[in-house]
Image (cartoon, rainbow, N blue to C red):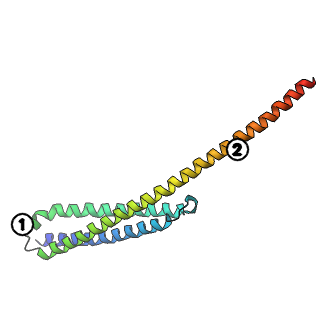
Amino acid sequence: MADEKRYIDIMIESLQKKEKVLDGLLEKCDAQAKVIAENDYGDIAWDRFNVLIVEKEALIDKLNDLDDGFQALYDRVGDELKENKESYKEEIKSMQALIKVLTDKGVSIRTKEEKNRARLERVLSSAKKEIRQSRRSMAAASNYYKSVSGGLSMDTSSKLDSKK
């Protein structure tokens, strides 16, 4: 029973660590939102944006490790918790409260990620339109130049041929 109590305490500690990691993810999502808040593709600090992605990946890895550890502990003491709910009443309430907070933060992260994704798609779509328009303009200018220079070269070559 002493081991189970220790495992349960570690589970609670794991949930508390997970909350801190989720707080970190929320901060990174907010930072990404600020970075991509600029309307123009060229105004965005892409280096900073990429650094935030790498930092978020590290936090997600940490979150996965915490989840795996929590699950391993729960596999060990889950039956004990179910069989002796009354003995672990306070610990169970504590874990339930933490899980509710974690769930709320997870939903908040998903919402922020979705907004960031939509904002990023708008920026990239706008950049694609600008690139497409630029290519069309360049192609039109190139065609005009070719037709003008091509016309001149034909006139010149025909004049050269006529002089012979």
Query: How many numbered discs sit on the rendered protein?
Result: 2
Quadrant for residue 10, please give it. bottom left
138 relative to 153 in the view: left or right: left
Q: Are marks 1 and 2 in contact (CB under 8 Å)?
A: no
Q: Which residue is mark 2?
A: 141
The numbered disc on residue 83 is 1
> Toward which corner of the image does residue 43 lie, by quadrant?
bottom right
Between 7 and 53, the residue placed more toward the observer is 53
**Which amino acid lies under the numbered mark 1 shown in the image of this protein?**
Glu
Check disc 2 and report its element: helix, strand or loop. Answer: helix
Q: Position of residue 46 (x, y in %)?
A: 53, 60
SS of the residue under disc 1: helix
Q: Residue pushed farthest bottom?
A: 90
Quarter of the view holding residue 86: bottom left
Name the spot of residue 118 as percent of width and height, x first: 43, 58
Q: Residues within 10 Å of mark 1 (few under 14, many from 20)?
A: few
Name which residue lies at 43% across and 61% down: 116
In the rendered image, the quadrant that contains the N terminus is bottom left
Residue sitting nearer the eye, 136 or 53 = 136
If you read the primary sequence from the N terminus, does the residue marked by circle 1 or circle 2 appear first? 1
Q: Residue at x 33, y 68 (%)?
A: 22
Dot in front, 1 or 2 = 2
Residue 80: x and y, percent?
Answer: 10, 66
The type of residue carrying mark 2 is Ala
The image shows residue 26 at horizontal and vertical percentages of 38, 68
**In the displayed structure, would residue 92 be above or below residue 136?**
below
